[in-house]
């Protein structure tokens, strides 16, 4: 058992190998200094001023590295501390959703205030050159639906006076109706109980559905456990691949009885089971 747990922990550590050079005791100002290229003194002041002192260090590292991976310069990241205070996966999912919906000029401040900009009318976003003039937001969204037959069924053109988030919500609702064979009442309940689904990327939603179906969940069970659609797929994939057999239990079988296991951060599973 010890050896099995040790192997599980080693596999998980490889998943987060990009942050392995930081010890658990490193202070957040040291991370800021190292990754964003400012002095220790400047970083200490920044962390204190931006209330980053108590943010989980590994989460801070991931936030910075993700922002850098999409082309944001260090100075721009520093000027938008909201990018660092939010959960890194939230930032990533907002970025994906905006790209899918026609946002072509996503500056750091726009991503940092994603919900604010998502609520703007498409016309205003075009006037600010955030979305190109000729972009059909609804068409841009359905192009990211894998099932092209469903994509054509759910497409509905919206005028540019419609807020971007309403276009996204309408297309997403229609998609889920077709994909999960759901009725209007099912979708209303889903969006009422799990409100964060409204802003989810189509890529993320479809990946979550695929994972649930791989586990044998039918459409009714997915709708009943709507949090599966609102999940972070990276958590689910890591749990299924690196903790497939934990403490002598088959993880897939356990998840069928307790679906919320899929939503647990892998690091928490390590803490719970002491591996």
Image: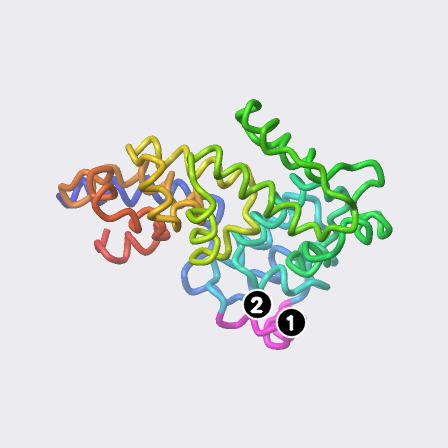
Q: Are marks 2 and 1 in contact (CB under 8 Å)?
A: yes
Q: Can you tell which quarter of the image residue 81 is in?
A: bottom right
Residue assigned mark 1: 46
Looking at the image, the residue that sits furthest to the top is: 149
What main secondary structure does the magenta stretch of the protein show? helix
Residue at 15 percent across and 41 percent down: it is 249
Q: Relative to residue 54, is residue 106 drawn left or right?
A: right
Query: Where residue 256 sits in the image (x, y, percent)?
Result: 24, 41
Residue 240 lies left or right of residue 184; in this view the side is left
Mark 2 and mark 1 lie on one chain; the one further toward the N terminus is 2
Which residue shows up at 50% across the image and 51% down it? 197
Distance, label 2 to label 1, CA atoms, is 8 Å
Residue 84 vs 130, above or below: the answer is below
Q: Is residue 43 magenta?
A: yes
Seen from the viewer's position, the closer of residues 138 and 216 is 138
Secondary structure beneath disc 2?
Answer: helix
Image location of residue 27, percent across then percent down? 50, 67
In the image, is residue 215 above or below residue 5?
A: above
In this rendering, the count of numbered labels is: 2
* Marking on residue 29: 2
Magenta stretch bounds: 40-54
Q: Give percent across and percent down for residue 192.
A: 46, 58
């Amino acid at each position: 058992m010890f050896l099995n747990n040790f192997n599980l922990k080693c596999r998980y550590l490889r998943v987060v190998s990009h942050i392995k050079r930081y010890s658990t005791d490193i202070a957040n100002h040291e991370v800021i200094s190292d990754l964003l290229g400012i002095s220790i003194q400047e970083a200490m002041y920044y962390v204190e001023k931006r209330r980053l002192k108590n943010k989980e260090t590994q989460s801070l590292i991931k936030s910075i590295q993700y922002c850098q991976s999409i082309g944001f310069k260090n100075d721009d990241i520093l000027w938008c501390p909201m990018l660092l205070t939010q959960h890194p996966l939230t930032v990533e999912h907002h970025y994906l959703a905006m790209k899918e919906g026609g946002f072509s000029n996503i500056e750091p401040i726009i991503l940092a205030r994603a919900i604010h900009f998502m609520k703007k009318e498409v016309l205003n976003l075009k006037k600010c050159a955030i979305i190109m003039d000729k972009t059909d937001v609804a068409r841009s969204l359905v192009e990211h639906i894998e099932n092209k037959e469903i994509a054509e069924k759910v497409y509905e053109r919206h005028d540019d006076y419609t807020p971007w988030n309403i276009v996204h919500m309408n297309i997403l609702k229609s998609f889920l109706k077709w994909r999960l064979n759901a009725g209007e009442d099912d979708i209303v309940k889903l969006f009422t109980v799990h409100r964060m689904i409204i802003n989810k990327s189509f890529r993320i939603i479809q990946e979550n559905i695929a994972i649930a179906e791989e586990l044998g969940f039918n459409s009714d069970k997915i709708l009943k456990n709507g949090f599966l659609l609102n999940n972070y797929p990276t958590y689910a994939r890591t749990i299924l691949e690196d903790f497939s057999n934990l403490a002598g239990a088959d993880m897939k079988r356990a998840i069928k009885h307790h679906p919320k296991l899929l939503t647990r951060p892998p690091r928490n599973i390590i803490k719970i089971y002491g591996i």
